[in-house]
Image: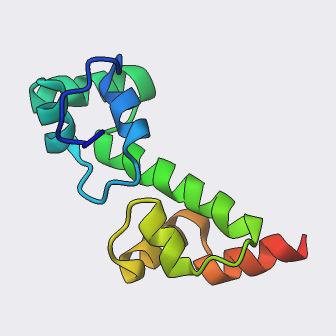
Amino acid sequence: MRPDAPAPHLSSPVDFALAHLDHPDLNTGLISTALNLSERAVQKSFFRHVGQTPTAFIMTKRLERASAMLAAGDGRTITDIAFEVGYNDSAFFTRCFRRRYGASPSQWRHRSLLS
């Protein structure tokens, strides 16, 4: 399903975001358009269900997925993982990852493989 197409089977903006985390343009505006809701309604739904803004939630979930992929050690490059989880700039992904986990993606991978 295209992220800009209506998604009547998804029950909330949070569900929609989870289903489309890999889409680099995923944001409040795209979610509101896809679900035919106002941006404010999307923001309120996120606060009510997860206690975060849509942007913070999307970033957190993408980084969680990336950290698990890095730990798997399956040979994918860091750039491939960044793109797979929804980032379209590997340098930005690395900065976000380091801010969240206190280590670069390559350091995270190395530590995960040693443990």
On the rendered structure, is 108 left or right of 87? right
| Residue drawn at point x = 19 percent, y = 28 percent | 6
| Residue drawn at point x = 49 percent, y = 48 percent | 61
Residue 54 in the image, given as x and y percentages of width and height: 30, 40
Q: Is residue 49 above or below residue 94?
A: above
Q: Quadrant of residue 24?
A: bottom left
| Residue drawn at point x = 9 percent, y = 26 percent | 38
Classify the position of the N terminus by image quarter.
Answer: top left
On the rendered structure, is 4 left or right of 69? left
Residue 109 in the image, given as x and y percentages of width and height: 71, 76
| Residue drawn at point x = 17 percent, y = 41 percent | 4
On the rendered structure, is 20 left or right of 84? left
Q: Quadrant of residue 101?
A: bottom right
Classify the position of the C terminus by image quarter.
Answer: bottom right
Q: Tell which of 57 and 13 is nearer to you.
A: 13
Q: Quadrant of residue 96?
A: bottom left
Q: Tell which of 48 and 15 is nearer to you.
A: 15
Residue 51 in the image, given as x and y percentages of width and height: 41, 30
Q: Could you tell me how many numbered marks the image carries?
A: 0
Residue 34 in the image, given as x and y percentages of width and height: 17, 33
In this picture the colour scheme is: rainbow
The outermost residue toward the front is 1
Q: Tell which of 19 and 113 is nearer to you.
A: 19
Q: Is residue 60 above or below residue 37?
A: below
Q: Is residue 4 above or below residue 70?
A: above
